[in-house]
């Protein structure tokens, strides 16, 4: 159902070695998105490439911290909203990041 669409996904700058859209602190990526008031939860998909999104995390709020990233890797993220009936909406925009090697 398209009513579960998200407006925007972004990576936050919260820590050292930041650029204006990316936050990395101790190999963690901070994600934040515009939530949907009708969503019961959100699924976060991550991939090492932007065409192969597979890792799935879940959040009940419109933000998530991914602490399983590795230095020297490139990651892409998308988020979907999930209704209380378990219906998953469409993908958000893609947010991408390169994790710097300290």
Image (cartoon, rainbow, N blue to C red):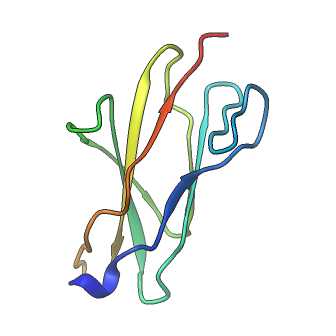
Judged left or right of residue 50, residue 74 is right
Q: Residue at x 61, y 33 (%)?
A: 28
Residue at the front extreme? Answer: 20
Residue 23 horizontal/vertical position (percent): 67, 38
Residue 35 horizontal/vertical position (percent): 51, 76
Between 53 and 60, which is closer to the camera in this rendering?
A: 53
Count every numbered label the image shows and give the total. Answer: 0
Q: Residue at x 48, y 66 (%)?
A: 8
Residue 65 horizontal/vertical position (percent): 58, 46
Relative to 73, does residue 36 appear above or below in the rendering? below
Q: Quadrant of residue 52?
A: top left
Q: Residue at x 59, y 17 (%)?
A: 100
Q: Residue at x 25, y 69 (%)?
A: 90
Residue at the top extreme? Answer: 102
Q: Is residue 39 visible?
A: yes
Judged left or right of residue 43, residue 35 is right
Q: Is residue 83 visible?
A: no
**Which quadrant would the C terminus be assigned to in this image?**
top right
Q: Quadrant of residue 49?
A: top left
């Amino acid at each position: 159902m398209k009513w579960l669409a998200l407006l925007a996904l972004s990576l936050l700058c919260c820590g050292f070695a930041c650029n204006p859209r990316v936050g990395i602190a101790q190999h963690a990526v901070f994600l934040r998105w515009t939530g949907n008031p009708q969503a019961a939860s959100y699924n976060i998909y991550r991939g090492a490439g932007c065409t192969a999104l597979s890792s799935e995390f879940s959040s009940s709020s419109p933000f998530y911290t991914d602490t399983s990233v590795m230095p020297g890797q490139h990651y892409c993220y998308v988020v979907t909203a999930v209704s209380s009936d378990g219906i998953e909406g469409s993908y958000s925009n893609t947010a991408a990041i390169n994790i710097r090697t300290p």
